[in-house]
Image (tube, helix red, strand yellow):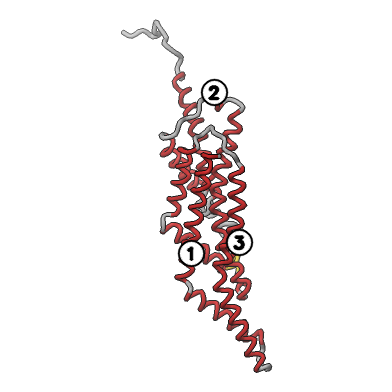
């Protein structure tokens, strides 16, 4: 017969669970960089992506990378330095996602200018990504960019670059944030440059159409400029959009490659910084 009370007690029940609390704390600190990136990235950071999906992807990616990272000591996480570590991890993830978002905004800016110059700016609807009113041309361009981005495995390259940042910049090392500020300013300037290149063929075609309409109305003043010119401009823009699909795809592909290269360069500069 077994005794009701053991003679010796080796330890209090539940003491082994202290290790789980430490592991959970280290796990959530590791997930900060990935979660911040998924919030600000162009594809997974869209408003039409449910929060549960982004949270699930963050947990799965953290489980993959967590076993290859050096865990932060409990003494460091329970000190005042943990505040700087948390903020630095969030800033790294947000900056990496915002760099891609700024680069991809070039196609939205090009679509807005094409729509404004052709009279298609009246056709606007709520953008599910940002929640604001944007022209339909901009949304078509942006969906075209997302299709090429996913079909060329750009999202996998971006996630792989972010996961590689854990190797070159381990958790607990606070980088120089001047690199992110300079990268954001450079990306903003490149956004306007890339948008100008993308919309340049459409602007030239619209200029030629408007000059032709001006010559026609000058030779025949009885023709109404607004009734004829507006319809001809719309038809001309549709033809230009149709026949320039290949060149537009090449421009968007170059934009995606340049944005990913810029993201990799910024992550690589964190080591020297």
Query: Most extreme residue toward the right, as rendered?
Result: 221
- Nearest the viewer among 64 and 257 is 257
Res 144 label: 1
Query: Most extreme residue toward the top, as rendered?
Result: 7
Identify the residue under disc 3: 192
**Badge 2 element:** helix
Residue 118 sits in quarter: bottom right
Choose the circle earlier in sequence order: 3 or 2: 2
Q: Which-is-in-front pick, marks 3 and 1?
A: 3
Choose the circle earlier in sequence order: 1 or 2: 2
Identify the residue under disc 2: 75
**Badge 1 element:** helix
Residue 6 sits in quarter: top left
**Quadrant of the drawing holding the N terminus:** top left
Q: CA distance from mark 1 to mark 2?
A: 49 Å
Q: CA distance from mark 3 to mark 2?
A: 47 Å
Residue 183: image location, x then y, percent: 58, 49
Q: What residue appears at the point 60 percent right and 71 percent down from the top-left corner?
A: 115
Choose the circle earlier in sequence order: 3 or 1: 1
Q: Eyeballing the image, is 228 above or below 108?
A: below
Residue 233: image location, x then y, percent: 59, 80
């Amino acid at each position: 017969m077994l005794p009701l009370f053991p003679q010796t007690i080796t330890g209090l029940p539940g003491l082994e669970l202290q290790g789980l609390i430490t592991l959970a704390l280290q796990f959530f600190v590791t997930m900060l960089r990935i979660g911040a990136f998924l919030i600000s990235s162009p594809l997974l950071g869209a408003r039409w992506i449910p929060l549960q999906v982004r949270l699930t992807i963050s947990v799965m990616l953290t489980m993959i990378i967590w076993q290859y990272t050096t865990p932060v000591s409990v003494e460091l996480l329970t000190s005042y330095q943990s505040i700087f570590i948390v903020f630095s991890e969030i800033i790294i993830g947000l900056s990496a996602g915002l760099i891609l978002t700024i680069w991809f905004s070039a196609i939205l800016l090009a679509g807005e200018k094409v729509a404004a110059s052709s009279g298609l700016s009246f056709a606007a609807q709520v953008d599910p990504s940002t929640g604001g009113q944007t022209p339909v041309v901009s949304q078509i361009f942006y969906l075209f960019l997302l299709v090429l981005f996913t079909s060329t495995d750009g999202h996998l390259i971006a996630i792989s670059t972010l996961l590689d940042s854990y190797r070159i910049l381990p958790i607990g090392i606070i980088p120089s944030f001047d690199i992110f500020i300079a990268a954001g300013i450079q990306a903003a300037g490149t956004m306007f440059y890339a948008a100008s290149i993308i919309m340049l063929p459409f602007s030239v075609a619209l200029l030629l159409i408007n000059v032709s309409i001006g010559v026609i109305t000058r030779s025949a003043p009885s023709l109404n400029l607004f009734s004829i010119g507006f319809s001809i401009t719309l038809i001309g823009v549709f033809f230009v959009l149709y026949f320039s699909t290949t060149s537009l795809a090449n421009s968007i592909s170059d934009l995606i490659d340049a944005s990913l290269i810029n993201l990799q360069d910024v992550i690589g500069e964190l080591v020297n910084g």
